[in-house]
Amino acid sequence: MKQSRREQLHANARMEIKEVAMGQMLENGSAAISLGAIAREMGVTTASLYHYFTNRDSLVSALIVDAITSLIKSLQVARDSLPPEDRIGRLQRVAIAWHQWSVANAQQYLLIAHHQKMGYHVDPASIDPEVDALLEIVLNLVEGAVQAGDIDIDSAQSGGRMPIDEEAKLRTLLPSGDAYEPRVIYLAVNLWSFLHGLNILDETLRYTHLKEEWIDHAVKQEIDRFLRSMEGRE
């Protein structure tokens, strides 16, 4: 359905506000989003911004949705760069793409991962569909590799064995949780957790004098090692 001129102007204004917020994030960090500062930069009143976002947290929610959508697109491109039958290769490409996106878009990544610690109060329902879609990319790849025998789920060691009492919790992680073997969800969550730790470590290492090429090589080695442990080869 074609947007009306009023709807288009509203969408354009929201986009401009988000772009200014992104600029402030890049300059001052993810925890520094301020409607007052955005209004001053745009030359408008703070009250006028409430026509487009009900409060700062609704703006943060929109920024998180945009960030996750961008990350998902990067992962899909990486996944589809290899044929479906190369299941482990696809997992590796997705893992590397996830890490590379997180480093290249550090402030957006930190906003996704740590918005609560930054003092933002985001309604989970406003970002859950994107978070679910993100996790399902990894889940579907892990499930396909398990079903094809590329990952031996009985001997996979990544993250240790699944605690018996965690099965019910794992099924509630996303709406389609009942469609997956709990151990598949467990492996996917472990991979997600591993990548998060790797991203934070990478950001820390970049404050040192280590060459970025060395860090990138070390990251790829770590991802390969982790995936080998998922396959049950370590």
Image (cartoon, rainbow, N blue to C red):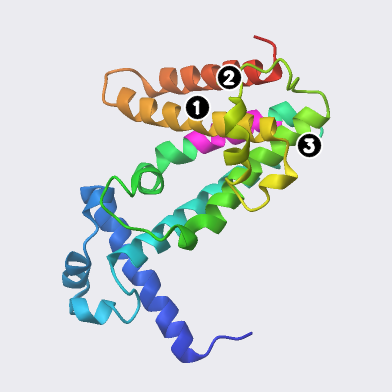
The earlier-in-sequence mark between 3 and 2 is 3
* The residue stretch that appears in magenta: 90-99
Residue 34 vs 90, above or below: the answer is below
- Mark yes or no: residue 71 visible: yes
Residue kind at label 1, given as amino acid type: Phe
Label 3 sits on a secondary structure element that is loop
Q: CA distance from mark 3 to mark 2?
A: 22 Å
**Residue 48 rendering spot, x and y as whole percentages:** 24, 82
Please determine whether, in this image, residue 27 is positioned above or below residue 96: below
Report how far apart the C-alphas of labels 3 and 1 lie in the structure: 25 Å
Few, some or many residues within 10 Å of mark 1 (<14, 14–19, 20+) = some
Query: Could you tell me which secondary element the residue under label 2 belongs to?
Result: helix
Residue 215, x across and y down, in percent: 42, 20
Q: Quadrant of the C terminus?
A: top right
Is residue 86 in view from this perspective?
Answer: no
Badge 2 amino acid: Phe
| Image spot of residue 224 (x, y percent) | 60, 19
Indicate yes or no whether the magenta region holds residue 41. no
Q: Amino acid at mark 3?
A: Pro
Residue 106: x, y in percent?
A: 36, 41
Closer to viewer: mark 3 or mark 1: 1
Identified at 19% across, 76% down, the residue is 46
Q: Which mark is residue 194?
A: 1
Name the main secondary structure of what is drawn in magenta.
Answer: helix
Q: Are marks 2 and 1 in contact (CB under 8 Å)?
A: yes
Q: Which mark is residue 226?
A: 2
**227 to 27, vertically: above or below:** above
